[in-house]
Image (tube, rainbow, N blue to C red):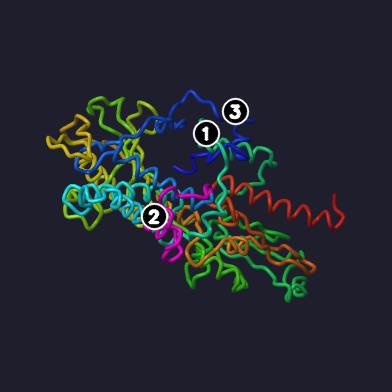
Amino acid sequence: MGATWIHGIGGSPVYKIAQEIDSMKSDKPWECMDGFLDDPITIAENGYVLNPSLVDPISILFKNLMDFAQGKSISIGDVISAKDGNGNGSVGSFLRKGLEDYWELESRKLNGLGSWNGNDSWNRKLLEEAIFAMHENTQRTYTSANDLYNLDYNAESEYVMCTGEEITIAKGYSSIIESLASVLPSGVIQLGKKVCKIEWHPESEVGMIENDHDDARPVKLHFLDGSTLSADHVIVTVSLGVLKAGIHDSEDSGMLKFNPPLPDYKTEAISRLGYGVVNKLFMQLSPDFPDLDQFPFLQLVFLQSDSKVKNPKIPWWIRKTASMSPIYRNSRVLLSWFAGEEAIKLETLSDEVILDEVSTTLSEFLSNSSDSHEQCNGNVIKNSSKVDLVKVLKTKWSNDPLFLGSYSYIAVGSSGCDMDTLAEPLTKSGSHPLQILFAGEATHRTHYSTTHGAYFSGIREANRLLEHYQSMGYN
């Protein structure tokens, strides 16, 4: 339901820990997530499996564009002008400019042999746009951005991916957390203690501490149950979503507040940074489904919203879902990812509605069709009856009060500098420095949105405190 993937094993502290505690092996297949090892089948909402000759050039184009945006390559092949017309400075505008350049190049290649706007070519162009959109929607789940037009282009090349393959932890991410916590003394971790207010003292008020607190500790935590705790330092690791909710004027006693409020430069950085929602939907196939152990990894191609031939039976909240696949080989549990407003909509739907509308959508994709087109290979998955799903399980990250979303991204109008600003401690000097420190994925400029980024940020703040006390003569 939560974090699943190690995004690159090279240099990942999560992978290192998982190896050390033997979490990479398990007899239980459901944590192994090997369904993505098979070649995907790309299928359009009309029921046709799309020919690789149609899919592959668009997939390669998208990968080349993203590699260029992320600084992995200095060339985008034939699409040489995409970088020059980057609209609002977003990844979305860059990608669409690249697609337009590709179409212009293909149109010139025809050189009078056929019209790009003729009926056949126009159908092909619609499908190419839909395939491109499928990859865009996958990118939305990677970044949590509702709209790639709100994802900053310049920051994309600053993001650092760990090298090597992306894998899951066979014994689950919980094994990592349990290992980290096992070295702590018993009773140190207090559960069920939600912090609703953090009192601290800016440098100008440090002299007042002795009058305010009997134990002269500069920070005071107020819990929702009415209890308090005084401390020399607090490391705030709540999500960016919780910080965003807390800086808005709200009477909600459950929101995290700071007293006095965080300085303007800090709240402005929090406001500018992007924070989105990504949800998973697990679906269990009926035992009656034919070839139950051979359900493929599907890439779903939806015709775009302005297309007159799109299927009216498919609800809008499913139309930006890029894939559906078994969670492991031969499993009858399927997984799809949702991002942005579609992910938020998913949280509001009853299980009955989800079962019905996803079953209908799958049936439309897997239905037989007798016609064939030049851009399709005519293959269909042989299942003319409705696909029955018997159970669903979904995440609800936007409604979880401890997260209010999933993970952060650099929004247009923001920059990596805002993450550095968020990571700065309060206060930096005086007789009681480092009262409030900040950690979490949204405070790591190059590894945000990942568990290893969160881990790196925790190490950073631990080292900050160690260096502080070493400078004071403590060993």
Q: Secondary structure at mark 2?
A: helix
Identify the amino acid type marked 2: Gly
Q: Secondary structure at mark 3?
A: loop
Dot 2 and dot 3 residues touching (CB under 8 Å): no
Q: Marks 2 and 3, how far apart in space? A: 44 Å
Question: Which sits earlier in the primary sequence, circle 1 or circle 2?
Answer: 2
Identify the amino acid type marked 1: Ile
Residue 286 coordinates in the image, percent (x, y) = 25, 31
Residue tagged by mark 1? 169
Q: Marks 1 and 2, how far apart in space? A: 36 Å
Mark carried by residue 98: 2
As drawn, is 204 to the left or to the right of 286?
right
Q: Secondary structure at mark 1?
A: loop
Is the stretch drawn in magenta largely helix, strand or loop? Answer: loop
Q: Residue at x 35, y 53 (%)?
A: 99
Residue 401 coordinates in the image, percent (x, y) = 47, 57
Q: Is residue 64 visible?
A: yes
Decide which of 8, 363 is in the foreground and name it.
8
- Label 2 CA crowd tier, 10 Å (few <14, some 14–19, many 20+): many
Mark carried by residue 386: none
Furthest-bottom residue in this view: 204
As drawn, is 350 to the left or to the right of 13?
left
Q: Residue at x 16, y 50 (%)?
A: 119
Mark carried by residue 22: 3
Identify the amino acid type marked 3: Asp
Q: Which residues are magenta?
A: 72-97
